[in-house]
Amino acid sequence: MARWQPDAPGRLAAAALDLFEEHGYENTTVIEIAERAGLTKSTFFRYFPDKREVLFGGGTVAGLLVEAIASAPPEAGPLDAVAHALDALGRTFFTADRREFSRRRQAVLNANTELREREALKRIDLTTSMIEALDRRGVPVLTARVAAQLGTLAWEMAYDQWIGTDSTEGFGPLARKALAGVRAVGAMG
């Protein structure tokens, strides 16, 4: 009998990425992903509703953002709370050991319209999660929307740099620099 191995979601994501690269997204089935990961189809669906979702963390990122905004120092303004959340993502999700996976993942997303559309919807959901987290901190709705959207823009800029082939800097510092750049542009009036 095979020995149980931990991190089923991570194994499923790695298997899916390998298969998407080898055979294309359209030509890969959930059953093939589960088999490659050494798991069953029912285990796949325990973690992900469909094969598109396997490359999007199953809500992990949104949860991290919300928790980090909530745990930002009480005196932190809206953008500082968002910066706190981006730092947390850099420490816990966009780590050095995930950089190569993220590069490969982005290449698969870029090659597939359906996955790019899912990525755009996920970013909207993440922005909404940040707005709601800021609202729970008492930030006025309009301010929360602007801060979350600026945070999403900074995230996109930092992520693109972080997965760049010559990048060695961590996601958190890149996100802080991007957010500072966004703030500077906003201050230009």
Image: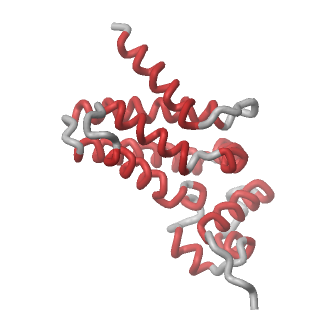
Counting from the top left corner in percent of width and height, residue 8 is at 62, 71
Question: Residue reaching furthest bottom?
Answer: 1
**Left/right of residue 5 with respect to residue 184 in the rendered view:** right
Which residue is pictured at 75% across the width and 33% down the height? Answer: 165
Up-down relation of residue 153 to residue 20 (above or below): above
Residue 128 visible: no
Q: What is the quadrant of the C terminus in the image?
A: top left
Which residue is pictured at 65% across the width and 42% down the height? Answer: 110
Counting from the top left corner in percent of width and height, residue 78 is at 30, 33
Toward the viewer: 88 or 154?
Answer: 88
**The quarter of the displayed image where residue 24 is located:** bottom right
Which residue is pictured at 19% across the width and 41% down the height? Answer: 138
Which residue is pictured at 39% across the width and 47% down the height? Answer: 68
Residue 116 visible: yes
Up-down relation of residue 33 to residue 155 (above or below): below
**Left/right of residue 63 with respect to residue 74 in the rendered view:** right
Toward the viewer: 89 or 40?
Answer: 89
Counting from the top left corner in percent of width and height, residue 117 is at 53, 46
Q: What is the quadrant of the N terminus in the image?
A: bottom right
Counting from the top left corner in percent of width and height, residue 42 is at 57, 80
Up-down relation of residue 163 to residue 29 (above or below): above
